Image (tube, grey):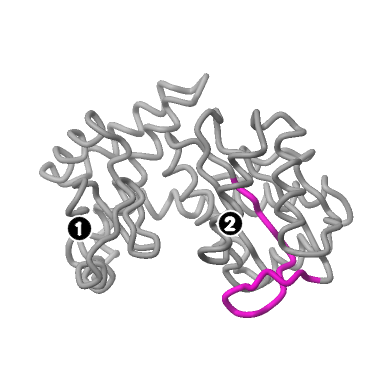
Amino acid sequence: MVLTKYIRKSCILPELGAENKSDALRQLTHLLFDKRRMKGVGPALDQIMAREVAETTGIGKHLAVPHARISGIKALACAVGRVREGLDFMALDKEPVQLIFLICYPPTQQTTYLNFVATVTRLLSNPKHFRTILAAETADEMYATIESASQTFTNDHVKYVRKLRTDPAIENLPDAHVDLILLARLQLYEEMLDASRSGKRQIRRDIESIRGLVNPRILKHYDRLMQARPPALVPVEGDTCQGCFMKLPSKFAQQVRQDTEHIHTCNNCSRFIYIV
């Protein structure tokens, strides 16, 4: 996705004057509130801080993606902070964090959030993009770099998705992996349809195109879940299903990680699951 659809220039701080991790999280959360991207600070900040206590969102390579799922917020919103000299974030690779993408999103846009995070992490794993954002002088320049890079990345990914199941040159890709990608894309487009004010006709056409590629048996279960208790496809974080928030048996969680030949469902809520 194009990241700047969810990032405003006014929500980018080129020089985040934070002395520590907690201060950085507070500043960026308050920035979203100040710019009217959400109605209150308390619930978001509580969730973000609790997440950091449980597990750091400093994912490595000088990048952090703190996040919170907030009821009442209308759409995903992101604040970006840059600390050129680096900030101790207790990151997984022990390296200081220089870019922070703080994300708040509504429960109805979980797939949008996952696609946003995936785009951020894939994009900034490219040293060229990372260096360009660090070198930018202003928020406008940072915004332009993020927009251009994510647009290129998104166009390339769309071409890849369109090839699935239709290009004989793609070999050795398990059917379960293809269906999982297609389900994620389908769920994202349905979230976009609900949130969009324009372009609904094209989104509906895209939805029908994707549905035609998904295994009918899997699609039937997906539709039942979306009618009864959306979302139908959810991640597993820390062995916990993010749909019902029940912890999976450790043996089963390990099986989900290792078995790429099948799509798995939560043994409690029956949602499709995958490990992040």
Q: Farthest residue in the bottom direction?
A: 94
Q: Amino acid at mark 2?
A: Val
Magenta stretch encompasses residue 33:
no
| Secondary structure found at label 2 | helix
User: Taking 43 as reference, is 128 left or right?
Assistant: right
Query: How far from the left and from the top, in percent, is residue 118?
Result: 50, 56
User: Taking 88 as reference, is 68 left or right?
Assistant: left
Res 11 → quadrant? top right
Q: Residues within 10 Å of mark 1 (few under 14, many from 20)?
A: many
State the residue at coordinates (67%, 47%): 147
- Is residue 133 placed above or below 194 in the rendered structure? below
Q: Amino acid at mark 1?
A: His
Magenta stretch encompasses residue 90:
yes
State the residue at coordinates (28%, 54%): 273
Q: Nearer the viewer, mark 2 or mark 1?
A: 1
Query: How far from the left and from the top, in percent, is residue 92?
Result: 57, 75
Q: Nearer the viewer, residue 137 or 209?
A: 137
User: Taking 240 as reference, is 40 left or right?
Assistant: right
- Residue under numbered circle 2: 120
Q: Which residues are magenta?
A: 86-103
State the residue at coordinates (41%, 33%): 191
